[in-house]
Structures are given as C-alpha cells and as structure tokens.
Amino acid sequence: MPAISDLEIGLFFWAEPDARATLVNVLSTGVTSGQLAIDGTVKLTPETAAEWKAALAEADFHLFTVFAAYEGENYADIPTVERTVGFIPKATRAEREVRTREVIDLAAALGVKSFGCHVGYIPHDKSHPDYIDVRDMVRRIADYAATHGMSYCLETGQEPAGQLLEFFKDVDRSNVKINFDPANMILYGSGEPIEAFKLLRPHVISVHGKDGDWPDPAKPGSLGTERPLGEGSVNIAKFFATLRETGYTGPVCIESGVHGEAQRWEALKRDVELLKSVRG
Ligand code: MG
C-alpha cells in the first residue's frame, strides 16, 4: 500500500474494460491513489471485482472511493440533470438502488472504505413525496454501506451548501459524509465554493480538483463551463489555502472532463504537476 500524505493528490478516473491498462494510464500521470468511477454500463460480476482487486494490488494503488454513475444520466443542462441524474427520477429509482448496492459490494470486495454518487436535485419542500422517498433511500444506502464499514459520500453541486447541509442533517446517519467538488458549485450556480467548503467542512472527507466558469446568466437553465485546472473561476491557490486553514488533510482527486481522448493522459499529468506545485 503506497504512503498517503496530507492533501494527497489523486485522480478520479472511470473504470475501462481492462483494469490493468486503466491503471497503467492512471499511474503515468504521477499519482498512486485516487477514486474509481463505475458507469452504468460496467458489468458487475465476481470476475470484475477479482480483476480490479488484482490490478490494484499489482499497481500498488490506493483507492479512496468508488463512485457510481447510472445509465440514462445526462448532464446537458440543468433541466436535463433534474430529469435524469441520481435518485430523483422516479422511473429508475428502484433499479438504481439495486445497482448502488452492487457497486457498494464491488467497493467492499476491493477493501475501499467510501462510496459516492450524485443524489440529483433534491426537492426544496421537505414534505414532497420525492424528498421523503429519496431521503429514505439515502438512509437505506448509508445503512447498507455501514454493514461493510463504509461511508457514503454525497457529491456537491446541485444544491447550495446550506440546503445540502439541511438534507444531510435530515438523513441523520453518522457514516454519511461529503465529497466536495468546488467546480460543481460554480457550474451549477450553487454558490461561491470557498464559502460552501467552510460551511460543509466538518463533514468533508474527500475533495475534487476541478475548475470551471459560472453559467451564462443570459441562458437560464444552462450549466457553466468546465475549464482546465487553474484556468477557471475556482481560484485553485485560494482554495488550497482554505483547505489548509480549515485543517483539511484528506485527498484532492483531480476530476477532468475537458481533455480530448488523444491527449487525455498527458494533460492529466500536467494537472497533477500543477496541483502538486500549488499544494507545495
Ligand atoms: Mg466531482
């Protein structure tokens, strides 16, 4: 198991069909730790778990978190996110709960202590049936994760920090935590990320290194634009200073969707170097 430093710079990456080849690329960026994301098309069989377990051991790679994404999710704009992402869409709620348990089982087989996903747009009205159903589903998933000694991380973005905190308190499970994504706060227009981080800080166990610009106010319902690390509105240096000031010592995993396929790993290598130099 590699040594993990304070503010360890890791990589958020997607499971590709060949676990070993995926990790060769991930290691080429200069990290030895990260978060594995499982999209809805990945077949979750005992063989999948065995292949990832062997590949992680061979690569001496530390996984902080396994994330789940679901078939049918679409991040085109805010109304589409509301309609398709996480546990909110009623038509897929039951099947996504089953899938979530399967991804948690995979994480457990890999010895990972944290699971995460987007819940989706939580209704503001606490008496709304979707609010109640989704809150209860989050409780069931948290309780299932707890049977594996695992925390369940809510990913930030769709809610302002205050609203997420209210939901968090209402869920009322000690193993529910927060994966804080500063760029998502900007991309969804959910609030200034440094203030949001300070509010959520006691519950944050992992952080994403991502950057972006605010939505265009002339285009209601639009999302902001993801930008290369250091070129967006997060203010990465100030964000790292805030991580330090607030005593956060957990990982910062680079999540980037802006690099084209051909240059992706080279570009991520530069991102890793950039964050390591900002961290110092
Ligand atoms: Mg993120």
Image (spheres, rainbow, N blue to C red):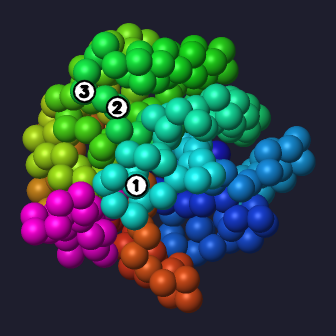
Pointer 1 with pointer 3, Cβ within 8 A: no
Mark 2 residue crowding within 10 angstroms, few (<14) / some (14–19) / many (20+): many
User: Which residue of the protein is positioned furthest toward the bottom in this rendering?
Assistant: 262
Label 2 sits on what residue type? Ile
Q: Which mark is residue 124?
A: 3
- The residue located at (27%, 62%) in the rendering is 223
**Residue 212: x %, y % from top left:** 24, 66
- The residue located at (74%, 71%) in the rendering is 21
Q: Is residue 206 left or right of residue 245?
A: right
Q: Is residue 224 left or right of residue 26?
A: left
Label 1 sits on what residue type? Thr
- The answer to which of 9 and 150 lies nearer the viewer is 150
Gap in Å between the C-alphas at discs 1 and 3? 18 Å
Q: Which residue is mark 2?
A: 122
Q: In this rendering, is residue 169 above or below 65?
A: above
- The residue located at (60%, 38%) in the rendering is 92
Q: Which residues are magenta?
A: 208-232
Badge 1 or badge 3: first in the primary sequence: 1
Badge 2 or badge 1: first in the primary sequence: 1
What element does badge 2 sit on?
Answer: loop
Q: Main secondary structure of the magenta part?
A: loop
Q: Which residue is mark 1?
A: 80
Pointer 2 with pointer 1, Cβ within 8 A: no
**Residue 160: x %, y % from top left:** 19, 38
**Residue 195: x %, y % from top left:** 10, 41
Pointer 3 with pointer 2, Cβ within 8 A: yes
